[in-house]
Image (spheres, rainbow, N blue to C red):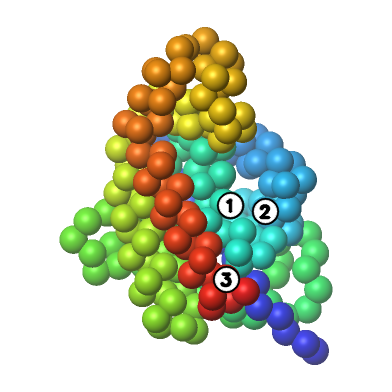
């Protein structure tokens, strides 16, 4: 049977034990995220909760990973997520539910998530980690996301709200009207929320993926 290369994402919720009714909140949020991301061709299958606060999916393509990761974080806020991404083979036909599937990509994603939980040997906190059979790619990707994660952990609720609206509108004036703010306040929230730096890391990651996995 022919095996293709896919990107599998496995996630869990930071400090999940401190949150009430997490299972219900997680289920509702993931249902909405699945609908939007299936329509936007960011994922191939709806998210499936595997155990407790853990869930998984398969990205539409490796090239879509930077957008998928940020879109998921934005949609799931205020829940903070740890993400493990594995790039590898998945045997057989892709079909629901995703948690019934297996293979190399799932194994690597779980290794990556374990690295996040274990600190991955870093002296600072990381929330995202990649694992593949390419050590150079993994090292570069994990450096990029270690830097992005450092910025993400500083974003406030108001800044996340501004980022979410601006990403839909892509114009300061349109975002300002929806948020009922002036354009200068929107611009300031984006800058203080490190939005432009985050976008630049996403673009760098897209180029890296296209060069290696495109």
Closer to the eye: label 2 or 3: 3
Q: In this view, does 203 lie to the left or right of 50?
A: left
Does label 1 or label 3 sit earlier along the sequence? 1
Residue named by callout 1: 68
User: Which of the two residues, 53 or 79, is positioned nearer the viewer here?
Assistant: 79
Density class for disc 1 (Cα within 10 Å; few <14, some 14-19, many ≥20) is: many
Q: Residues within 10 Å of mark 3 (few under 14, many from 20)?
A: few
Left or right side of 121 for 1: right
Sequence-wise, which precedes: disc 2 or disc 3? 2
Can residue 176 be seen in the rendering of this structure? yes
Give the CA separation, mark 1 to mark 2.
Answer: 6 Å
- Check residue 210 in the rendering and tell me which mark sits there, or answer none: 3
Residue count near mark 2 (Cα–Cα under 10 Å), binned few <14, some 14–19, many ≥20: many
Residue at (62%, 74%) from the top-left corner? 214
Quadrant of res 90 = bottom right
x, y percent for residue 159: 40, 28
Q: Which of 31 and 74 is in front in this view?
A: 74
Report helix, strand or loop for mark 1: helix
* Helix, strand or loop status at disc 2: loop
Residue to which mark 2 is pinned: 42
Q: Please, is residue 180 above or below residue 35 in the view?
A: above
């Amino acid at each position: 049977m022919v095996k293709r290369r896919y990107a599998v994402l496995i996630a869990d919720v930071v400090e999940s034990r401190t949150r009430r009714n997490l299972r219900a909140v997680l289920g509702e949020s993931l249902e909405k995220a699945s609908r939007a991301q299936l329509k936007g061709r960011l994922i191939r299958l709806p998210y499936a909760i595997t155990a407790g606060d853990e869930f998984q999916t398969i990205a539409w393509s490796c090239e879509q990973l930077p957008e998928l990761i940020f879109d998921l974080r934005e949609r799931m806020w205020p829940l903070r997520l740890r993400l493990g991404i594995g790039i590898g083979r998945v045997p057989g036909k892709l079909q629901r539910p995703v948690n019934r599937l297996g293979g190399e990509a799932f194994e690597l994603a779980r290794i990556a998530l374990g690295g996040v939980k274990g600190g991955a040997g870093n002296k600072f906190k990381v929330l995202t980690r990649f694992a593949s059979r390419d050590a150079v790619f993994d090292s570069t990707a994990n450096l990029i996301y270690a830097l992005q994660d450092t910025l993400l952990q500083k974003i406030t609720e108001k800044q996340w709200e501004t980022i979410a609206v601006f990403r839909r509108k892509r114009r300061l004036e349109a975002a300002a009207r929806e948020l009922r703010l002036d354009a200068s306040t929107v611009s300031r929230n984006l800058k203080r929320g490190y939005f432009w730096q985050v976008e630049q890391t996403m673009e760098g990651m897209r180029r890296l993926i296209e060069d290696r996995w495109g």
